[in-house]
Amino acid sequence: MEQYIDNDTQRPTPATESAVDPTAVRHAIRAYGEQIIQQELQYAFSRLRVHGTLMPEQRRVVNKMATAILDEVLSSPESILENPSRYDTKTIRTAVDLFSPDQ
């Protein structure tokens, strides 16, 4: 990604913002996170079955906990990518590098 930074504000210029499509990255991050949740839930439920059957309410609680964890983990990068003009290029690049499934 080419870096175009306004030297006065240290904020990305429009050219920088267009180099990374924040909406596309946010959607990709969320989709990848959902995929990980499903994999981890499948693993957790298979491990929990060893100790007995989970009741439907217990399964819902575990699902809600997994979703809450994902929401918390992704809240910061999603916030950065929702409002890229509020952040410097380094912060945006870090969010993309750390959380983009394409990286």
Image: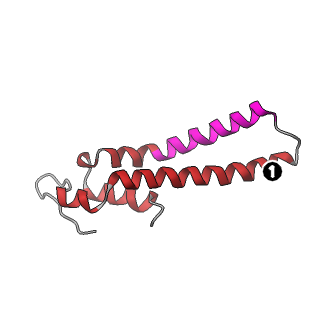
Residue to which mark 1 is pinned: 47
Residue 86 visible in the displayed image: yes
- Magenta stretch encompasses residue 26: no
Q: How many marks?
A: 1
Q: Residue at x 12, y 58 (%)?
A: 7
- Is residue 15 rendered to the left or right of residue 39? left
The x and y percentages for residue 40 are 67, 52
View extreme (top): residue: 57
Identify the residue at image location x=40%, y=62%.
Answer: 97
Estimate the x, y position of residue 34 in percent, counting from the top left: 57, 49
Quadrant of residue 61 within the rendered picture: top right
Q: Residues within 10 Å of mark 1 (few under 14, many from 20)?
A: few
Is 64 part of what is drawn in magenta?
A: yes
Report the colour scheme. Answer: secondary structure
Q: Quadrant of residue 2?
A: bottom left
> Left or right of 17: which side holds 66?
right
Provide the residue span drawn in magenta: 55-74
Residue plotted at (63% across, 36% down)? 64
On the question of residue 13 being in view, the answer is no
Badge 1 amino acid: Arg
Query: Quadrant of the image for the C terminus?
Result: bottom left
Spot occupied by residue 62 in the image (x, y as percentages of width and height): 69, 38
Residue 66 point in image, percent of width and height: 62, 42
Figure quadrant of the N terminus: bottom left
Residue in the image at 14% along x and 51% along y: 9
Q: Residue furthest left?
A: 8
SS at circle 1: helix
- In this view, which residue lies farthest toward the bottom? 2
Q: Magenta part mainly helix, strand or loop? A: helix
In the image, is residue 54 above or below residue 4?
above
